[in-house]
Image (tube, rainbow, N blue to C red):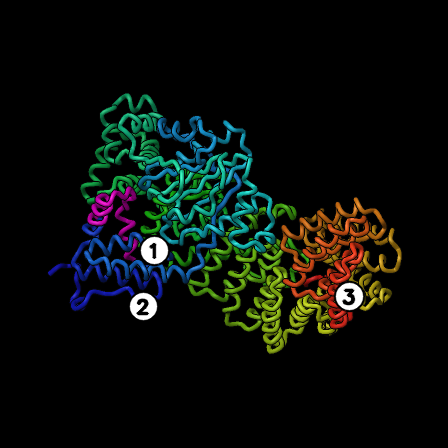
Amino acid sequence: MNPDRTPDEGGAPPEPLGAGSFDELAARLNTLRGWNGVSYRELHRRVVRGRRAAGNPDLPVFNTVYRCLRPGRRRVDADLVADIVRALTADEAVVARWRQACHVIAGLTADSSWVTVAGELPADSTEFVGRHAELAAITGPVGDECRSPVVVIDGMAGVGKTSLAVRAAHRLAERDGTGLRLWADLRGYDADRAPADPLAVLDEFLRRLGVPGGEIHRLGPAGRQATYRQLLADRHPVVVLDNAADADQVRPLLPDRPGGAVLITSRRRLTGLAGARPVHLEAFPGTESLDVLRRLVGEAEVAEDTEAAARIAELVGHLPLALTVVAGRIRNRRDWTLRDHATRLAERRDSLRVEDELENAIGLSYADLPAEAALLLRLLAIHPGRDVDTRAAAALAGVDPRTAEELLGELVASSLVQRRVQDRFGLHDVVRLYAAGLARDVDAASARQAALGRLFDYYRHTACRAMDRYAPHERDRRPEVSTSDVPAPDFADLAAATAWLDAERHNLVGITTLAEEQGRGEDAAMMSPILNRYLYNALRFADAEIVHGIAVRAADPLVQASAHMSLGAVYLRSNRYQESIGQLKQALTRYDAGGDRTSWARALNNLGNAFDRLSDFAAAEDCYRQALLVHRATGNRTSESRALGNLGNSAMRVGDWDKAEAYLDEALAIMLEVGDRLGECLTYGNLGTVHEQQGHSAEALGHYRRALVTAREFGYRFPETEALLHIGVLLARLGEHDDALAHLTEALDLSRRNSLGEFEVKALNGIGMALGDQGDAAGSIASYREALAVAEKLGDRYEQARAHEGIEHGATVTGDTGMAGDHGRKARALLAEIGLRSSVSGES
């Protein structure tokens, strides 16, 4: 009887269909292995032999195969699962069922939207040696200007694909004087997370190319690709797409014309990329392996025993990563000769039957680590993000930052951890896989959970401190959280807080998701009110939906209510008005049941804004009045000022300018008192409108320009766009058409780039008016038609009426009475429906 088979494994082999998680799938796969009576080592050998026979250069290490059959997975490689099943059975129909199960479960995860992207290249390694022919093939003269800029570097894990791509990218950028450099980790072979969604990568690339998040959100997949390719055209970019899973993943990220370079790394030989130039990497020749050891260990040491150095290179398979790791061990053990190191490598391989040279090298260097450094390496491997700073590492390990810095230094010296830009640290994928496996074997589940709990507590506490600087006027809306044993950085100003939030955003979202998965759902839900204002202002809608979605699933109805209100604000900002109303009504119901009148009133205020965008002005004003009464009764000054501002807008709609001015002056005074700079910008703009309607053009321009200066000072795109719009329209009415068109065109550009549809339609209507006043009837009609299309999409009846009136006027000038009559009738019908004027409300 085979020792791997258990008595209850008789009968039919286990099937994958019906598995609802990766853990369940892994358990069934392991049962299938036992049912066939195959050991883990034999299974690994069969998978490697099968891939070699198929010409697949991606030969998995033993740990990769072993971990695929163990619990604790957040991702499973469908190709590896298929190869494991194929090694156990020759039935391709069975293989197909297992592959399909992987895809079904993967479709239930949201990992693919978390991407790691940079607007700069990783640092070029000082340890890079060799690859002269490959470098020349990538960086040498192209000759034909129409030649594809795409290069695919493929080879097995640890063969040095990324190092070659980074070295080549730096050379190309320096040679061509390229300032545009982009890098992304596509996570094609990450052990725990799904491959990166190319549209999410495209989103991040566009942000680094200067396209704001709102405009990206407005574009569909085809629009994002078109915008990306247009921005790359004639700029000779250098783009590195690291760890690609397949051709489909990289295809949306490629330029559509020659110029620049795109370097792709993958463990597979990607086919289907027209014109791409392949560069296949094998292990180093013996001479280059010795060059690596000379560079990393020392010329004299290698010269002293070249035979032993050659034996070391042979024992680690001449793989660049393995050579680097072993060199780190040699540097740290100067009391050993090279022959000692070679002997130890051979002994470990024989005693543990480690057939994979890379695993052997990593394992031997790991074995030399002090206990505290080894623990930190294992914990870094289970961190949900891709890199950490010293403080986060300290929280994970439960040590002070100085100790963490020393431990990280040891890990860097051992070449097991990589120091990245801005003093951040990360692991090579192969090292991460190895160390994560050890963490699950060596460290108790309770110890791992405790470490991740410390990390979550640190991130939550530090996020609160950053938000206190980022949005101090909303401190009362964020929960009180316990302090962390690791102190937060000193956020000296808004810029420092914003920089930390930007750098840690992916880690914050990742640790929040992981906390919920580990049963800390109520704690995870606290991140929703903490990060709300940052994610909202930064237009990080996908991240906001993940974080607020976790809070919606919390047990506390008031926490749910807060999350519904946050989602309502996100949907309102992204012009999803009906979805916004649905979320806000759910918030109102829960706040009412929980007796939280202050938050109920804030949700009601936002609901009024949603009604306002749909031109239901009576419903909007009713919401604002009810909200104001509650805010005054509870003493919530910030929310009181927002309700006053919105009531001022309502008075503006009916032309009661004196009442509007009184409301807005009162709102502005409170905003200045509490430091609500965003509300201040919006209110200056609305006061400008009041003065403009009262015939005080100079005062109006003064208010608009104060709004513009303040908005630009604090980086508020929303009020900046509104102020430009107001200035442009007023200048057009004053007959300063050129200056007016300049402001309106800038407002239009900002509104489109930031997905501010309500301002886009106003800017188009304003441009139509300015062109018409200049005598350009055709241009005026064209702009009004664009405005009409946007207004109809938004459901904004007032701006539709304005556009119809503008077309009517232009058609009258050109003598097209039929067109004029048709649009005039439509304008009057719409105005009869609403009977009021429209303006923009501030969200609370």
Q: Secondary structure at mark 3?
A: loop
Sequence-wise first label, 1 or 3: 1
Residue 686 quadrant: bottom right
Apparent side of residue 457 relative to residue 835 in the rendered image (left or right): left
- Say what amino acid the circle numbered 2 marks: Gly
Q: Which residues are magenta?
A: 45-70
Name the secondary structure under disc 1. Answer: loop
Residue 446 lies, with reference to residue 359, above or below; the image says below
Provide the residue designation for mark 2.
18
Q: Which mark is residue 308?
A: none
Tag 1–tag 3 contact (CB < 8 Å): no
Report whether 393 appears left or right of 808. Answer: left
Disc 2 to disc 3, how far (Cα)?
57 Å
Query: Is 808 placed left or right of 734 in the picture?
Result: left
Q: Nearer the viewer, residue 568 or 484?
A: 568
Q: Position of residue 415 (x, y in %)?
A: 37, 37
Which circle marks residue 76 in the picture?
A: 1
Q: Is residue 106 magenta?
A: no
Work out whether 641 lies above or below 57.
below
The residue that appears at 54% across and 63% down in the rendered structure is: 548
Q: Main secondary structure of the magenta part?
A: helix
Q: Residue 653, percent across and down?
A: 79, 66
Q: Looking at numbered disc 3 in the image, what kind of residue is underneath it?
A: Arg
Q: Where is residue 637? Give x, y as percent.
A: 73, 64
Callout 2: few (<14), some (14-19), or many (20+) C-alpha neighbours within 10 Å?
A: few
Residue at figure coordinates x 71%, y 52% from the top left: 721
Name the residue tied to disc 3: 837
Q: Are marks 1 and 2 in contact (CB under 8 Å)?
A: no
